[in-house]
């Protein structure tokens, strides 16, 4: 029996082995997340190379962020309606074309346009979660989703680590050439190796909700990104924030009325969905902003009274403990969640991340102190992020997986925008005579980020309690039939 509103498409008797599919998905997601951060350490080099200013060059990041925020939920919904494999290929093609254009960009304007095209590739996140649920043995869905989720944080940290060696050895253009090669290969691999989804949610995509979603996200993120330069109380910042609120309210109203909503507001009101999304928002505040500013802290000349005068490569290596810890904890998070519950892991992980950030705020005089604090933050973020996706997938029906997981990933990005903007405002509030921010700005900023992670732990307590057995049972439901499977993959009645 099918879920209401859900149809199954004919499937071949011979399908790609799920580990092959997983390899394609993992590399695709890793490539996308790397693109979020590869350019952060080399923005000053791009600024000089393209003869632009700091305000303009920041749009290399902002344009990518805006585009991904808009297209992630849209592509996820298109995948649910028209086929996840088909839209995965399209997302990878967008990443590849955008990377090629960025590598060849003759001006800052073309580079920013290329980053907008790359942002369409944000659809790989919800599509990967949906394909895993469709293709994996049902007792392995939870662990696979956890590993892919951990790649979101790992890729961001790894991008900062890898940017220095790549830029120093090959030139910053190779920060785009390498992703172009990898995503082009993955697009071909997706065509050949990733099977099409057996589950579809029919219906056309309503254009007006998509326009309103794009409008309020652009207004919000533009205000948050430019507020440090314009001022939080400036007419432009306040006007954009008001416009974002009005457009968001209009978007919600329209979504509630259309026959086929882009985002199901009834789904978003589910306790298991909104609470998990709130935690994702707060985790995004802490993680993305810390990765964005710790390298700047490390590169500050020690003559300023803090910092280590590190090169791009050296400052990236100080971030390596965080990336490694995030990945390793992501691998074991699912098995831990099976024993103590995913909610407990999320709360504990968020609290550990807050502890690491508090340590960074007060103990950053030595390189080893920064490395250890980063490692602790990575452990916490890895545990929490790895379990969020599973909680979202378990809270909705299979046909909503793409939209729900896409919105969750999108909310993390929005959280990162908020954290980065707030951190920038704090850090740049006061400068030393040599032109570098005062140390107190970083200390206060790290404390604010620690508070965000602590708030995530508190918000996690509101996530509905689900026993490990119930969560695993929900994840093991066959999306095409509504039936469930035991731990060995044996069929059980749907009512069991």
Image (cartoon, grey):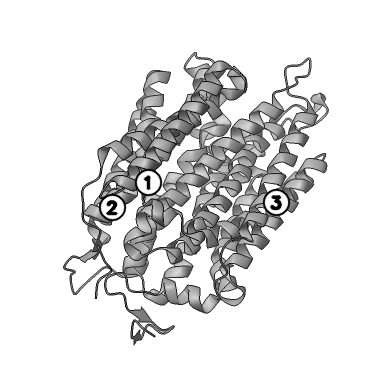
Q: Is residue 457 left or right of residue 465?
A: right
Mark 3 and mark 2: Cα distance apart in space: 35 Å
Tell me the quarter of the image containing the C terminus: bottom left
Determine whether label 1 and label 2 are within 8 Å by CB: no
- Residue 226, position as x, y percentages in the image: 55, 23
Total marks in image: 3
Residue occupied by mark 3: 454
- Residue found 71% across the figure and 57% down from its top: 352
Residue occupied by mark 2: 79
- Residue 124, position as x, y percentages in the image: 37, 50
Work out whether 392 lies above or below 282. below
Q: How many neighbours does mark 1 have within 10 angstroms: few (below 14), some (14-19), or many (20 or more)? A: many
Mark 1 and mark 2: Cα distance apart in space: 10 Å
Q: Is residue 220 among the parts visible in the rendering? A: yes
Query: Nearer the N terminus, badge 1 or badge 2?
Result: 1
Which is more toward the observer, 453 or 94? 453
Q: Is residue 438 left or right of residue 52?
A: right
Work out whether 404 lies above or below 46. below
- Residue 247, position as x, y percentages in the image: 42, 32
Foreground mark, 3 or 2, reads 3
Label disc, if present, on residue 73 of the rendered structure: 1
Q: Is residue 339 left or right of residue 309?
A: left
Q: How many neighbours does mark 2 have within 10 angstroms: few (below 14), some (14-19), or many (20 or more)? A: many
Work out whether 188 lies above or below 313. below
Query: Nearer the N terminus, badge 3 or badge 2?
Result: 2
Q: Secondary structure at mark 2?
A: helix
- Residue found 71% across the figure and 45% down from its top: 451
Query: Nearer the N terminus, badge 3 or badge 1?
Result: 1
Q: Secondary structure at mark 3?
A: helix
- Residue 289, position as x, y percentages in the image: 61, 39
Tell me the quarter of the image containing the N terminus: bottom left
């Amino acid at each position: 029996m099918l879920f209401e509103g859900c149809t199954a498409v004919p499937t071949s008797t011979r399908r790609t082995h799920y580990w092959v599919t997983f390899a394609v998905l993992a590399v695709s997601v890793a490539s996308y997340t790397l693109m979020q951060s590869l350019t952060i350490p080399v923005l000053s080099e791009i600024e000089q190379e393209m003869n632009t200013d700091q305000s303009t060059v920041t749009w290399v990041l902002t344009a990518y962020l805006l585009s991904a925020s808009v297209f992630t939920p849209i592509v996820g919904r298109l995948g649910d309606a028209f086929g996840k494999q088909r839209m995965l290929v399209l997302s990878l093609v967008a990443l590849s074309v955008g990377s090629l254009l960025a590598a060849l960009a003759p001006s800052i304007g073309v580079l920013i346009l290329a980053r907008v095209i790359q942002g369409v590739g944000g659809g790989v996140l919800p599509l990967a979660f949906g394909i895993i649920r469709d293709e994996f043995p049902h007792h392995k869905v939870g662990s696979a989703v956890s590993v892919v989720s951990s790649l979101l944080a790992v890729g961001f940290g790894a991008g900062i680590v890898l940017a220095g060696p790549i830029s120093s050895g090959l030139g910053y253009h190779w920060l785009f050439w390498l992703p172009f090669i990898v995503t082009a290969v993955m697009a071909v691999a997706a065509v050949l190796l990733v099977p099409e989804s057996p589950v579809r949610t029919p219906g056309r995509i309503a254009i007006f909700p998509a326009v309103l979603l794009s409008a309020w996200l652009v207004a919000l993120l533009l205000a948050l990104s430019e507020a440090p330069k314009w001022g939080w109380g400036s007419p432009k910042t306040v006007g954009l924030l008001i416009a974002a609120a009005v457009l968001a309210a209009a978007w919600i109203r329209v979504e509630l009325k259309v026959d086929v909503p882009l985002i199901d507001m009834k789904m978003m009101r589910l306790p298991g969905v909104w609470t998990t999304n709130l935690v994702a928002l707060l985790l995004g505040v802490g993680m993305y902003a810390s990765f964005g500013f710790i390298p700047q802290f490390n590169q500050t000349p020690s003559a300023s009274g803090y910092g280590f005068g590190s090169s791009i490569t050296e400052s990236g290596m100080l971030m390596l403990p965080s990336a490694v810890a995030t990945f390793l904890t992501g691998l074991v998070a699912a098995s831990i969640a099976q024993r103590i519950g995913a909610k407990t892991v999320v709360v504990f992980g968020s609290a550990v991340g807050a502890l690491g950030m508090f340590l960074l705020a007060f103990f950053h005089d030595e390189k080893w102190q920064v490395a250890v604090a980063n490692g602790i933050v990575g452990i916490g973020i890895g545990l929490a992020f790895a379990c969020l996706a599973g909680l979202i997938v378990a809270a909705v029906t299979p046909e909503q997986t793409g939209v729900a997981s896409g919105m969750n990933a999108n909310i993390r990005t929005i959280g990162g925008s908020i954290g980065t903007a707030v951190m920038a405002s704090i850090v740049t509030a006061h400068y030393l005579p040599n032109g570098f921010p005062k140390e107190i700005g970083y200390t206060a900023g790290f404390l604010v980020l620690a508070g965000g992670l602590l708030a995530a732990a508190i918000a996690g307590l509101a996530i509905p309690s689900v026993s490990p057995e119930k969560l695993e049972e929900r994840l093991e439901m066959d999306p095409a039939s509504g039936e469930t499977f035991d731990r060995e993959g044996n069929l059980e009645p749907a009512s069991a």
